Structure formats: structure tokens, C-alpha cells
Image (cartoon, rainbow, N blue to C red):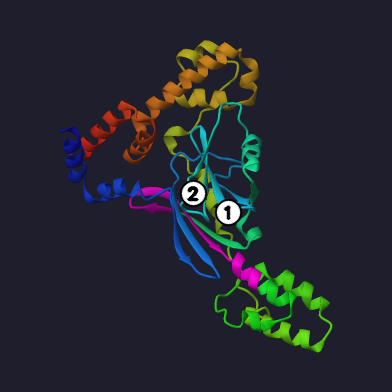
Amino acid sequence: MKKALLLSLFLMLNSCSFESILALGEVDKVQVVKKNASVSHYRAYFTRTQLKPIKHNKKYLYFYNKKQKDLAILLHRYDKYYLYSLYHPKQSKMVINTNNKTRYKDIKKVLKRKGYRETVPSSVAATSKVALRRYKGIKTLLVEIKDYSALQTKYRTAIKTYDAQKIKPIKTKLPHGFIDAYYKQYAEKASTEAQHAQLKIIAKKLNLNEPETKTIDEEKKVQEALAKEIPEEIEEPIVQTSIPFDYYAQEASYHELDTYLSKKETRDALSFNQYTQLKQRHTKLQEEQILKEGSLEELISLYKTNKNPKYKKRILALMKKAQE
């Protein structure tokens, strides 16, 4: 009966909201757009609600596993870090739990043990496009990656062996930045007329004699936009560390307490018991904050993991309100 009621409430929502609910099963997943012998194209929509800065105000970073030949993206939500594989869509995301002492260097160590090191896509022969998008009503971070490593290897082999025949059937264009330096290295080594002739054919195939269109650094703009994307209601007031402990333990709002606990000097100024007490209150206030102000999409996403009846009750209330 309850399941039937829940389903009916879902169906009674307007089409946009219903579409958003269905979209929850489609976001935070990587899809293969195109894959052939030359290039692999991947696309993903990651929910950007509650994304926290990871390093230098950046809210996403790339990591590469050389052994697995895997480019991945790191995101930080609440008290967890998530590493999503971009080259192996079927691979489960890696979840790293944190505590108040966890720093970015600790996360890097964990990922290093798993074979992942921080990188940028261009260093592994990949291009990236990132943008802020709404996917079926959900605020998302669109990430598109094109992996040219296979094509780069083919051209490098042709250049190294001075054999243009090996790349004759290729039609896909390879960005200059992935081959230009390598080409120049072997062009300088070429000593025979035949070698120069082969390199000339390869250069023509790559259009190396023509200037490549300069690309705007869209990722930098997206990182800056993400850093500024802070709702007005969670702008944090300046908190003086001289305020008594009792204030934070009993009266401070969630945002005041969150700011206080994020300060480096706070941990040193409090005893273990005091710090633990504030962390417990922070967790409680955080839950209240989410239940009070969280969107339907956020609550459903969280309920999938915590199965907290409070979230289910709030979800039903919001759906009923939407129906009315």
C-alpha cells in the first residue's frame, strides 16, 4: 500500500519534477559516447550540489592510473571523496571516508597506493570539456573526455620508423599538442632524403604546417564559477575564536559551527572531549540543515545510501507539497 502511494505521488508530480527524479539514476555515471581504434569519447553528468573545494578552491581534479590506463575525476561531497573512473564506466566509484583531521595530502596518499596520481588530461593525450549544466532539472557538472592515446601511439610509431604508410588509413585528426614535440624530435634526427620525405607526408596528414586553432581555457572558467557557486543562505559569517566553547556547544548555528571547526587552530585550542562534542553537534545540525533546506533530488540521493526514515518522511512531504 505504501509503495503504491509513493508511486502515485511520483506520477502526480509535474513532468519536470518527475523527469528530475528519474534523472537521479542517470547522473554520477560515465557513458561511452563513441569508441573506435583511434579515439574514445566519454561523457558524464555529476551532481554539483554540495561540492566542496579540494585544492586551491578547485572542486574537481583529475587522476591517472598508468597501469590500468585509467583517467579518473575526484569530487568532494560532505565528508567523503569520490573517485569516478572515466575510462572504465562499469568500474564502481572509489569512496574515501574522511574525518576532521583529513587533508588533501592524505587523500593523495590513499590514491597513490591505488596507483592514481594527480594529472591533467592533456598530459595523457586526452582533451576535456567541462561546463555547468542542468540535466533534466538537476544542477550538474558536465564532463566530456576524448582519449587520443591510441591515435598518438600510431602516429609516434609512424614517425619513429619514418613510415607514413602506417597512418595512411587514419581519418581522425590528432590535436597538435599531442604530437608536435615528438615530431620535431625525430625531424631533427632525420638524416636521409627518404626519411625527410616520409616525415613530410606525416606532417601533411597532421596539418602540422597549419596553425591550430587556439582553445579557450574553459576549465579555468568553470573552476572559478564553481568556487563562486555558494548559495546566499550558506554564506559564512566571520567567527571570532575568542567566543566561549559553550556558545558553539549550545547556541551557534550550523554555519557558525562549521566555520569554527574548519579553522586549523580550533583543534589545538580544544580538548579531545570538547572537540568530539562539537563534532557530534555539527553532524546533528548538518542533518537538520539538509532536512530543512535540501532539494528533493538531494534528499532522494542521500536516502539511497543512509535509508534514514527522517529523509523518507521529508521526501514524501515535499512530494505532497509539489502535488498541491
Which residue is pictured at 35% across the width and 34% down the height? 303
Q: Position of residue 115 (x, y in %)?
A: 64, 46
Which residue is pictured at 40% across the width and 49% down the height? 27
Residue 244 showing in the rendered view: no
Local SS, label 2: loop
The stretch of residues the image draws in magenta is: 133-154
Is 152 a magenta residue? yes
Identity, as a three-letter code, of the amino acid under mark 1: Asp
The N terminus: image quadrant: top left
Please state if 115 lies on the left or on the right of 31 as rendered.
right
Q: Position of residue 286 (x, y in %)?
A: 43, 26
- The residue where tag 2 is placed is 91
Q: 10 Å neighbourhood of mark 2: few (<14), some, or many (≥20)?
A: few
Q: Quadrant of residue 108?
A: top right
Mark with earlier residue (1, 2)? 1
- The residue where tag 1 is placed is 70
The C terminus: image quadrant: top left
